[in-house]
Amino acid sequence: MNDIMGNSGGKPPRAGFRLDKADGKVFGVCAGIGNYFGVDTMLVRVGFVLATLLGFGSPVLIYLAVALIAD
């Protein structure tokens, strides 16, 4: 059964978003997002590429902002 904070299985809550420079390709932003949300990193990267192609490049600016602000 879940507790009040929504944790299940006795796992500690995540401390916060962190760049994953070990598994990252450029700055580790997509790998960090994948780790934070528990999603495969490749899916995050494919989503980012699709968003960049459909969003006229604006996700690149968001990526750079996250890379410079996080950690």
Image (cartoon, rainbow, N blue to C red):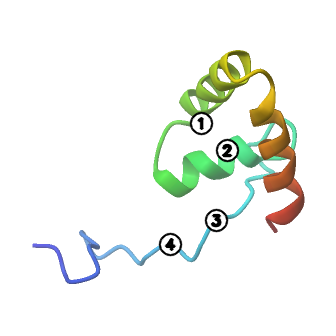
How far apart are the two marked residues, 2 and 4, measured between alpha carbons?
15 Å
Give the residue displayed 9% in from the left and 73% down from the top. Answer: 1
Give the residue displayed 79% in from the left and 54% down from the top. Answer: 66
On the image, the x and y values in percent for residue 27 come to 85, 46
Q: Amino acid at mark 1?
A: Thr
Q: Which residue is mark 2?
A: 31
Q: Quadrant of residue 48?
A: top right
In this rendering, position of residue 44 left or right of residue 10: right
Give the residue displayed 24% in from the left and 69% down from the top. Answer: 8
The local secondary structure at tag 3 comes to: loop
User: Where the C terminus falls, by quadrant?
Assistant: bottom right
* Tag 2 and tag 4, C-beta contact below 8 Å: no
Q: Which residue is mark 4?
A: 14
The local secondary structure at tag 4 comes to: loop
Give the residue displayed 77% in from the left and 21% down from the top. Answer: 56
On the image, the x and y values in percent for residue 70 come to 79, 64
Q: Which residue is mark 3?
A: 17
Sequence order check, earlier mark of 2 and 4: 4
Q: Amino acid at mark 2?
A: Ala
Q: Amino acid at mark 3?
A: Phe
Q: Amino acid at mark 4?
A: Arg
Instruction: Answer above or below: position of 28 versus 43.
Output: below
Instruction: Answer above or below: position of 52 versus 23.
Output: above
Name the foreground residue: 58 vs 15: 58
Crowdedness near tag 2: few (<14), some (14–19) or many (≥20) residues, C-alpha within 10 Å: many
On the image, the x and y values in percent for residue 52 come to 73, 23
